[in-house]
Image (cartoon, coloured by chain):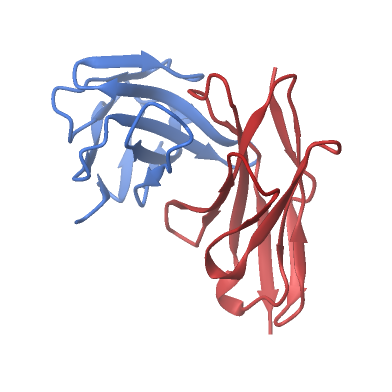
Chain colours: A blue, B red
């Protein structure tokens, strides 16, 4: 049982490049989410999904796209990277769409946009 | 609107000393409360949560927290810390009646010194 996995661990992009951050979980969780973590700003929710085929925006969705074609995978796409997207990105999952359930976090992806 | 304030951004402490990390929240409705820990270069993991019942909640690694409704606080305590407790600690709150949104504090960095 690997839990929540994220790839890559580190990435450097140039402004304007696109990329996909991968997230997968093997716990059959319905709920998955993406956060970014920035110094002094804590964790901010980017997008979330309550099940395959269903996604919704969090508090900072601009510049990011997501899709959920399977229960296991929830990739985050940066369409045209900007320096403001330099951050640490965490994927999380939980059994249900309820925050009484424990959130399980991946190890994070450190992204630098030059 | 709900909010979470972690009153100390950094807490230095010597090994084997007691520690308290403070968390206050603001909400007009009943809440559920959480503490998560982030060890260096890792994702977050749940330490403990308060949903209902006893206001003293025990978590992993010897941590406990007390829910104080009148003071709207959920302070985290440990009677004797170890070097391995060095980490970032996050308090979070969600609306008990509609617990789909988790509000995060900015985190407290606990540094345990020998």
Q: In this view, does B111 lie to the left or right of A70?
A: right
Q: Indicate whether B71 appears above or below B94.
A: below
The image quarter in which residue B72 lies: top right
In which quadrant is the N terminus of chain A drawn? bottom left
At a point 36% along the width and 14% down the height, the residue shown is A56
The image quarter in which residue B63 lies: bottom right
Measuring from the top left, give residue B41's x and y in whole percent: 44, 59
**Residue in the foreground of this view, choosing between A18 and A31:** A31
Q: Is residue B31 left or right of residue B47?
A: right
At a point 26% along the width and 51% down the height, the residue shown is A3
Q: In this view, does A88 lie to the left or right of A96?
A: right
Q: Is residue B2 left or right of residue A37?
A: right
Look at the image and tell me whether residue A78 can be seen. Answer: no
Measuring from the top left, give residue A71's x and y in whole percent: 18, 30
At a point 85% along the width and 36% down the height, the residue shown is B70
Look at the image and tell me whether residue B89 can be seen. Answer: yes
Measuring from the top left, give residue B57's x and y in whole percent: 63, 54
**Residue in the foreground of this view, choosing between B96 and B94:** B96
Q: Indicate whether A53 appears above or below B10.
A: above
């Amino acid at each position: 049982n690997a839990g929540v996995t994220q790839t890559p661990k580190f990435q450097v992009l140039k402004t304007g490049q696109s990329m996909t951050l991968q997230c997968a979980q093997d716990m059959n969780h319905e709920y998955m989410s993406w956060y970014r973590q920035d110094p002094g700003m804590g964790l901010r929710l980017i997008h979330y999904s309550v099940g395959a085929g269903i996604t919704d925006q969090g508090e900072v969705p601009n510049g990011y796209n997501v899709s959920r074609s399977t229960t296991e995978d929830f990739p985050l796409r940066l369409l045209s990277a900007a320096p403001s997207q330099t951050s640490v990105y965490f994927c999380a999952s939980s059994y249900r769409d309820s925050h009484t359930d424990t959130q399980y976090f991946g190890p994070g992806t450190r992204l630098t946009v030059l | 609107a709900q909010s979470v304030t972690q009153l100390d951004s950094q807490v230095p402490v010597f090994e084997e000393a007691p520690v308290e990390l403070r968390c206050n929240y603001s909400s007009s409705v009943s809440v559920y409360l959480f503490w998560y820990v982030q060890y260096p270069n890792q994702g977050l993991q749940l330490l403990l949560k308060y949903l209902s019942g006893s206001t003293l909640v025990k978590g992993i690694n010897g941590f406990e927290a007390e829910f104080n409704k009148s003071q709207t606080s959920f302070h985290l305590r440990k009677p004797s810390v170890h070097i391995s407790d060095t980490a970032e600690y996050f308090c979070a709150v969600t609306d008990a009646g509609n617990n789909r949104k988790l509000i995060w504090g900015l985190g407290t960095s606990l540094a345990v010194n020998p």
